[in-house]
Amino acid sequence: MKRISTPRRSASLSSQLVDSLRSHIEAGGWPVGTRIPPEQTLIEELGVGRSTLREALGALVHLGLLEPRVGDGTYVRSSSELQSVMVRRASSAQRDNVLELRTVLEEYASGAAALRRSEDELHQLRELLAEADAACAGEDMAAAGKVDALFHRAVVRASGNDLLIEVYDYLGTALSSALGGLPWDAVGAEEHAGLHRRLVDAIEARDANGAREAAAAIVRLTRDHEAKAPREAEGR
């Protein structure tokens, strides 16, 4: 098991311990969803006092990395405070706002991907398109939704912008959960697939403007689909 770095002795021992524990969580020493060791175990391992440890753990709870559960210990809630804040905010946002955020991120990322993508990244995009087509042909909408999320993450990764990739990875779950769940009819599904093919074609041709336009069109189609679905349900 990966050991936690013991903090240096100084007046700011508690803040150093926060940094040490945060680094340990970010490195996967305590995976998300797992219970951290008992208080006494940590005191002995780190060589710190109970009050110092409790202060540091409280700070990590405030940052959203840890979650205390009465009678059951403390669990890792998130691997990064940025992830915790952004996912929580996106999950509580209006769907239109989520769509606008997705447009901003994916439109820029698609243009950058067209200019910076590697042949391996292009090949991965083609493979994901084929997987999505196979899922839709089999009418497996759950699988199609998962592949679609992987596809858009792959586009963002091909942008080569490490900060954008990190932000999008943190928001990916919230974006997918906020925008998923509505089935497509045959016409809408084909248009949706066609826009994805158009996006990959533009990325392959290193056409940044074409890639941005295709990415924006995908989100517009999703927005129209979101707006249309409730009206169709009311008419049934």
Image (cartoon, helix red, strand yellow):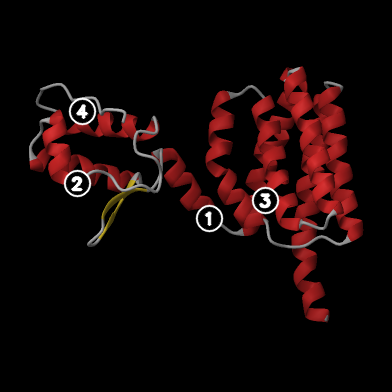
**Amino acid type of disc 1?**
Ser
- Tell me if residue 77 comes above or below residue 12 in the rendering: below
Q: Residue 129: horizontal and vertical position, in percent?
A: 81, 39
Category of crowding for the residue at label 1, using alpha-carbon neighbours closer than 10 angstroms: few (below 14), some (14–19), many (at least 20): some
Secondary element under disc 4, as helix, strand or loop, is helix
Verify CB contact (< 8 Å) between mark 1 and mark 2: no
Looking at the image, which residue is at 68% across and 44% down?
A: 149
One can see residue 207 in this view: no
Tag 4 residue: 16
Q: CA distance from mark 4 to mark 1?
A: 32 Å
Tag 3 residue: 99
- For marks 4 and 3, the one nearer the N-term is 4
Looking at the image, which residue is at 85% across and 46% down?
A: 193
> Residue 226 sits in which quadrant?
bottom right
Secondary element under disc 1, as helix, strand or loop, is helix
**Amino acid type of disc 2?**
Pro
106 vs 152, nearest the viewer: 152
Secondary element under disc 3, as helix, strand or loop, is helix
Assign the N terminus to one quadrant of the image.
Answer: top left
Looking at the image, which residue is at 83% across and 80% down?
A: 235
Category of crowding for the residue at label 4, using alpha-carbon neighbours closer than 10 angstroms: few (below 14), some (14–19), many (at least 20): some
Q: Which mark is residue 91?
A: 1
Q: Residue 48: horizontal and vertical position, in percent?
A: 10, 33
Assign the C terminus to one quadrant of the image.
Answer: bottom right
